[in-house]
Amino acid sequence: MDASVLVVGAGPVGLTLAAELARHGVRVRLVDKLVTPSPYCRAIGVTPRSLEVFEDMGLAREMIDAGLWLDGMRMVLPGQPPRDKRRDLSDLPYAALGVPQYETERVLTERLAQYGIVPERAVALAALSQAEDRVHVELDGPQGRESATFDFVVGCDGAHSAVRKALGIAFEGEGWPFEFMLGDVSIDWDVPRGLAVFAVHPMEDAPPDLLVAVPLPERGRYRVSAMAPARLMAPAKDGTDHGIQAERPGAGLADLQEVADRLLPDRPRLGDLRWSSIFRISIRLAEHYRAGNVFIAGDACHVHPPTGGQGMNTGIQDAYNLAWKLALVAKGEAGRRLLDSYEAERRPVAEAVIAHTVEESVNLGRRGEGDRLADTQVLVSYRGGPLADVAGDGLSAGDRMPDVEGLRRHGFGFPLRLFDVLKGTRFVLLVPVDGTTDTVEALAADIHRRWPGRVRVVALAPGEAGLDEPPGVELLSDAAGRFAATFGDGQAWLVRPDNHVAWRGPAATVAAAVPTYLAEVIGLK
């Protein structure tokens, strides 16, 4: 029997989507046209929000072990002494992490193997059509052409997406007329571990002369990028020529050293070039993210400058957003209307990322310090989207749920974080109680009867309430008072499987409002 969902593309986005669908109980097949994973380190930065996603997937420790913390940058501007700028993100669950893309893919691939899923390599999408709520595909692989049928197909196959092209979705935008060179090198200098180096010489009416060195986990190694000299550049092959130009020779060590000598005052020596490539940047956004039962995600939807390390992370969160919705529909537990919310929520995020990265790239070296959270992605919100209730003051429907510490549960010898409580694949309803749990017990019984296994009910009591835990309810004590301080008194919260707020309102309205929201807005059956 065919898998329920075909994922095309086994980069970080496709691997995340396949792993999430499997975690949600959906049968997945994952294919990629490459014979082997790419050896290039195109993406490094993992944002604090992506680490929260990986924590929910059970992968945060593995990712952290594979990387190093990116603590800030050394800025080198002409005529000024080098300046180290460290970024304090200690008020978030995670700081910014650096993981080479091939390591990110390794960790995700190993998790997929635990679900019994192995990416099928050297398999390319040749054709795609839809009929009677099914997707028919032709796949070219090592054994020849194969016909297969799926409930859904998702293209996570990059800027040149075969899935997007098969759907005829426009990918409007433009390519930059210049190229960059990348290289994995050792650098002999005194830069503290975990600091990137941005050496920028702004130019009038021209792109800046720059060298960016982002640290890799191995001590003394960096992925460097710089403007490619004219002799290494070539015309773009087509309108979506974005990313690493793997078929062309990369830069030599002497090319990278020349830029370092020009821009870095101490003229540190670069050595041991392990790989190099030419990189091209386009700025494009797909007109739509869906056609029928076929979706696109990641670079298949949006490409933009790499400033701030937003690209891979935005794609990972595309996958995280789509997976729980697609799983509910694929398993017949929610109506298809839920799938409309994927594009409605994620496309505006990509629009904002494109605008931000273009502005930051154009003004590189000309601006002061911006919002320290701007590139963390914890500020991403779906307010105003089809699943967000009317927004109010403060934390509202559509916002990312923040973490708090100091929660206690009977039988546990240690305090819990809110993220511990929210972890999993279900909706979580957080209801404050004081004095009695009768109402929340009755509410939980009704919800479990209507939607068994899809919603967890959590009651939060003051630190000294002394209540018994009712059946069907997880009873937590806000022992440190941090939940009440963060979320206010008397407010109930329904949290989506992707840890964004679905609904908030007075606890007295929960019994009527939450079942209505789940049935009418989410479409739970």
Image: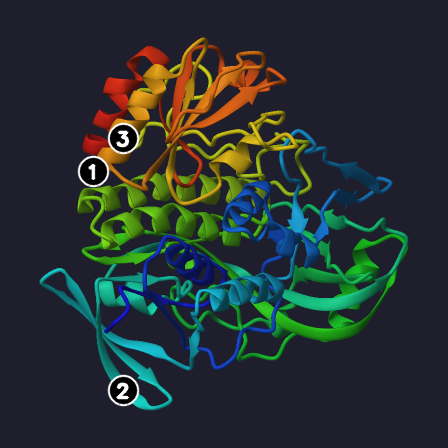
Residue 410 occupies quadrant: top right
Q: Identify the residue shown where x is 60% and y is 50%.
A: 60
Instruction: Please determine whether, in this image, residue 220 is positioned above or below residue 352.
Output: below
Q: Identify the residue shown where x is 71% and y is 54%.
A: 212
Residue 470 occupies quadrant: top left
Amino acid bearing label 3: Ile
Closer mark to the observer between disc 1 and disc 3 = 3
- Verify CB contact (< 8 Å) between mark 2 and mark 3: no
Tell me, for residue 145, which label it has, or none: 2
Instruction: Please determine whether, in this image, residue 41 is positioned above or below residue 49.
Output: below
Q: Is residue 85 left or right of residue 139?
A: right
Amino acid bearing label 1: Gly
Q: Secondary structure at mark 3?
A: helix
Of marks 2 and 3, which one's residue comes earlier in the chain? Answer: 2
Closer mark to the observer between disc 1 and disc 2 = 1
Mark 1 — residue? 523
**Residue 389 in sight in this render:** no
Of marks 1 and 2, which one's residue comes earlier in the chain? Answer: 2
Q: Identify the residue shown where x is 72% and y is 33%.
A: 88
Q: Position of residue 303 (x, y in %)?
A: 45, 54
What's the distance in space between the residues labelled 2 and 3, CA to CA? 48 Å
Of marks 1 and 3, which one's residue comes earlier in the chain? Answer: 3
Q: Secondary structure at mark 2?
A: strand
Residue in front for this viewpoint, 23 or 394:
23
Assess disc 1: are there few (<14), some (14-19) or many (≥20) residues with their C-alpha within 10 Å of its C-alpha: some
Q: Position of residue 236 (x, y in %)?
A: 46, 69
Q: Position of residue 412 (x, y in %)?
A: 60, 33
Mark 3 — residue? 447
Residue in front for this viewpoint, 382 or 108:
108
Residue 252 occupies quadrant: bottom right
